[in-house]
Image (cartoon, rainbow, N blue to C red):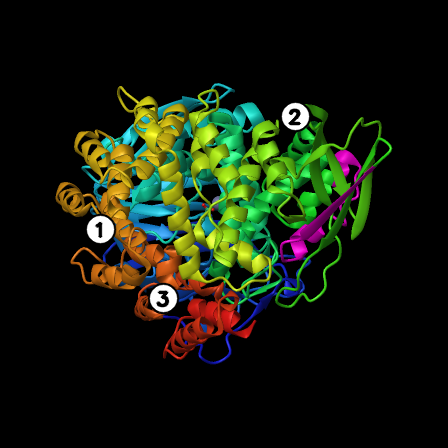
Amino acid sequence: MNDAAPNAAPQTFYLKDYKPFGYEVESVKLTFQLSPNATKVHSAIRFTPKADAEDNRFFLHGEQLSLISAKIDGTPVTARLVDGGLECDVPGRSFLWEAEVEIDPAANTALEGLYMSNGMYCTQCEAEGFRKITYYPDRPDVMSTFTVRIEGDEPVMLSNGNPTGAGEGWAEWHDPWPKPAYLFALVAGDLVNHPGSFTTKSGKDVELNIWVRPGDEGKCAFGMEALKKSMKWDEDVYGLEYDLDLFNIVAVDDFNMGAMENKGLNIFNSSCVLASPETSTDANFERIEAIIAHEYFHNWTGNRITCRDWFQLCLKEGLTVFRDAQFTADMRSEPVKRIEDVIALRARQFPEDGGPLAHPPRPEEFQEINNFYTATVYEKGAEVIGMLKRLVGDDNYYKALNLYFERHDGQACTIEDWLKVFEDATGRDLSQFKLWYSQAGTPRVKVSEDYADGTYTLTFEQSTPPTPGQPEKAPRVIPMAVGLLSPNGDEIRATEVLELTEAKQSFTFDGLASKPVPSILREFSAPVILERETTNAERAFLLAHDTDPFNCWEAGNALAKETRVAMVLDGAAPDAAYLDALEKLVRDDEQDPAFRALVLSPPSQSDIAQTLHERGHTPDPQKIYDAAETFTQTLAQQLETSLPRLYAATTVEGPYVPDADGAGKRALNSRILSLLTRLDGGEQAARQYASADNMTQQYAALAALMKAEKGEAQSKAFFEQWQDDRLVMDKWFALQIACAAPETTAATAKELTQHPLFSMKNPNRFRAVMGALAGNHAGFHHASGAGYQLLAENLIALDSVNPQTTARMCAAFQTWKRYDSKRQAQIQAELERILATSGLSRDTHEMVSRMLSA
Ligand code: 0A1
Ligand code: ZN
């Protein structure tokens, strides 16, 4: 059921309207009597009016609740049910509020509040789900201690904090740490645990558990190790210790997002915690390790210090993404992680920042906060912290962080609080830096150079295109990491950080014997688009000589893009010098295999579309596809004689270990296999498929075969082998669409929506199919419009089941204005069709209106 019928004007919330709640919540006691269709929730909450409150209106949020009774200090009262909650006349002193409500977890397909997944009760309260459990001031600045009693006949019944008692049909929990309601969690069901333990640096023993459905217990070991590594890393790097006797993780099949950091009881999408060599790829393992770390790190950055209001979401998310990236860099390879993150940022955040959904990391208004769990809030939020760290230096960064934890522990904070600790710790004025939080859009930085009499000058001009509601932008502080190389390839100036603060600014380097080759924006020191006139020869030079691994990759990436852009725009042949450079690199055993795999992976087709758009061209998806195919085929032919040897030389023998080293080698080997499969009719891939003992190699072989249209038998076999494994089946669904040719993509996806294992109720399965459709650039944007139509139809159907996932997936249309007028008209018609759906959710309504109105 959707909440409002918001084809009328929905309510907009503004940052500037923030007002504190008029009451302290001293304590919360909840009793759940579980029943699939009629769970009763009794709440007993002690409220005390704040002496300094501007507004003592007693309003509690509540949605989709049946109120059975309400009492104040034991006396029944009549509450007024109003839009989105209730109001009540209350005494002007401390009082005990009690309410009994009934809810229907089994009917809750939106997966917010208390719902059921495969017969198991679970909750998702961020951002505003708690109001679907009981009446409450459901806002992050209201923090309280929770005591929970669960009554039911489920074998395992969990909540936040520490267990305080249990018996036949009941369990009680107490969380001593005050928390906002969005961190509340309850899980009950037939679960088994994979146990572990961790001793903190101050000697406290913590019991760890990963809870799963019976049958999945063999897929927990990797997650448990990742958890222990995260706990140790946070102690070592940030000095932060865990603060309860128990840390539980639960795997849930039906979940809208990746995972959730509920205090002491993290709930995970099963795809983000369950792993085994037979069923998970290297990429899955890396992602699981990162998400476990992310949720664990939230215990301090999010839970102990939370957000004052949802506009401040990036306070916890940007920082926690930044921390999990540091962790992955430490556990694996720093340059590889940085390159992967920049690829992801350009693929997800840049299009958002340059389109109708652009918003600052700290938005100033929203209709539905769930629509702001975006790449901008998360990934750009993390980039902003990376810039801050670079500007103040490592020592000052950790000094500021220590001050943050000391000053704000137990509080609900703002971006102003966050920046203030940096100002106080370093004496720096961060008022201009703060623009990164309030301005949307990706800055463009134009670079020009000059050399005369031993002096080299770099001039930077920054500007940011208009974004919705922000026509003009002031110059920002941009840390620009720069190094200089001599023409013979030696580094003559090590990396230094130039601080751009003006619209146009020059920096000089003296005493140079000859004109240097600059390596600019090393490590991708700021999330900007660099514009610089340069040559392919210089790019090839940097690919060969740059000491900064990121920029070395970036040079190869730029060459790849230039080649492909020239192929698309001028029908040029693949650049011979670039092909030679690739050949040299792929054979260079001195180089890290993971790095070689990255350089050998071509930019995605949507990345080429994005590049064309940035340069003022209208991307033609079919031409981009054709160029990609021609390029890969030419590369395969160029490497033809060495491919079998390279394949053999990069094959990882011995038992599968999901570590960075093995993953890097397998990534390179898979890349070579996909090239080889274009030439050998799939022989090698078929052999690899038949002999693979791990999912990484099985999947790589299947993907190579399917891409070459030689994988029918293996696809059938894969289905037979894995049909009972939900997570592997998601891969099977997605791969068929990802590998389809442009003209058959929509038909393939449509057929899969008719498959008995397709389901609208499981977000992972829906995303596997519709996400793969949207991710197949040429297929989704096929001139027939069939891709657009199929996605729109399915989004309309999903909206009444699960508004949050529908709204999130609508973003597949966000780049619509960059295509030709025919495609624009097709997409516009689909967006209008979605918007005209009666009873459309507030979530989807907001997303589609934003895309249409910009
Ligand atoms: N805070 C979680 C992400 C999350 C957000 C919203 C959710 O439901 C609407 C669920 C999870 C994280 O950053 O991991
Ligand atoms: Zn998070």
Quadrant of the image containing the C terminus: bottom right
Local SS, label 3: loop
Check residue 95 in the rendering and tell me which mark sits there, or answer none: none
Q: Where is residue 762 in the image (x, y as percent from the top left)?
A: 27, 55
User: Residue 211 at x, y = what percent?
Assistant: 29, 37
Q: Earlier in the sequence, mark 2 or mark 1?
A: 1
Rendered residue at 44%/46% (across/down): 146
Q: Tell me if mark 3 has few (under 14), some (14-19) or many (20+) residues whose alpha carbon lies within 10 angstroms of its own.
A: some
Task: Determine which of the numbered discs, if any, sits on residue 118 in the image.
Answer: 1
Label 2 vs label 1: CA separation? 60 Å
Mark 3 vs 1: CB contact within 8 A? no
Which of the 4 image quarters holds residue 244?
Answer: top left
The CA span between labels 3 and 1 is 23 Å
* Tag nearer the camera, 2 or 1: 2
Question: Left of 777 or right of it: where is 405?
Answer: right
> Toward the viewer: 824 or 455?
455
* Horizontal side, residue 748 vs residue 419: left or right: left
The image shows residue 564 at horizontal and vertical percentages of: 49, 50
Kind of residue at disc 2 = Gly
Residue 410 part of the magenta segment: no
Residue under label 3: 65
Q: Which region is colored magenta?
A: 423-451
Q: Which amino acid does label 1 sit on?
A: Asn
- At label 3, the amino acid type is Leu
Q: Which residue is drawn at 48% across and 24% down?
A: 591
Q: Mark 2 points at which residue?
A: 489
Judged from the image, the secondary structure of the residue bearing numbered disc 1 is: loop
* Category of crowding for the residue at label 1, using alpha-carbon neighbours closer than 10 angstroms: few (below 14), some (14–19), many (at least 20): few
